[in-house]
Image (cartoon, rainbow, N blue to C red):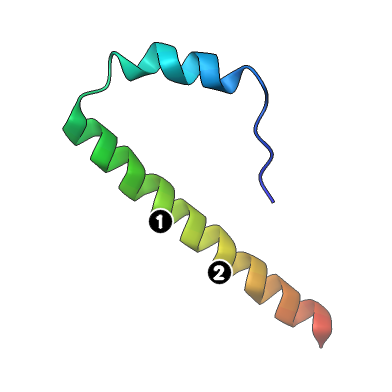
Amino acid sequence: MLRLSTPLPSAYLLLWGKISQSDLIHIKTVLRSCFMVSNYCYSIARQINYK
C-alpha cells in the first residue's frame, strides 16, 4: 500500500546517528499506530465498496 522511494535509506542512515534509543522506541510506536489506523481505514473502505 505504501511505496518507499529509493533515497530514503540514506536519509534514514543520516538520521540514525541523531536519534536516541528512547526516540527510536517512540517513533516505532507512532509508526505502528499509523499503520494500524491505515489498515483499519482500508478495511472499512473495502467493506463500503462491497455493499
Above or below: residue 13 compared with residue 20: above
Q: Could you say which is closer to the camera, residue 51 or residue 18?
A: 18
Label 1 Cα neighbours within 10 Å, binned few <14 / some 14-19 / many ≥20: few
Q: Amino acid at mark 1?
A: Ser
Q: Which label sits on residue 40?
A: 2
Label 2 Cα neighbours within 10 Å, binned few <14 / some 14-19 / many ≥20: few
Report the side of 12 relative to 29 (left or right).
right
Residue that badge 1 annotates:
33
Q: Residue at x 66, y 45 (%)?
A: 2
Q: Position of residue 47 (x, y in %)?
A: 72, 81
Q: Which label sits on residue 23?
A: none
| Disc on the earlier residue, 1 or 2 | 1
Q: Amino acid at mark 2?
A: Tyr
Above or below: residue 12 compared with residue 36: above
Q: Which residue occupies the extreme bottom position in the image?
A: 51
Above or below: residue 15 compared with residue 27: above
Tell me where residue 15 sits by quadrant.
top left
Q: Residue at x 26, y 41 (%)?
A: 26
Confirm or deny contact between disc 1 and disc 2 (CB under 8 A): no
Q: Secondary structure at mark 1?
A: helix
**Could you give the CA–CA distance between mark 1 and mark 2, rounded to whole angstroms?**
10 Å
Q: Residue at x 81, y 77 (%)?
A: 49
In the rendered image, the quadrant that contains the C terminus is: bottom right
Q: Residue at x 29, y 13 (%)?
A: 17
Q: Secondary structure at mark 2?
A: helix
Report the side of 7 relative to 16 (left or right).
right
Q: Position of residue 13 (x, y in %)?
A: 43, 16
Q: Position of residue 45 (x, y in %)?
A: 71, 71
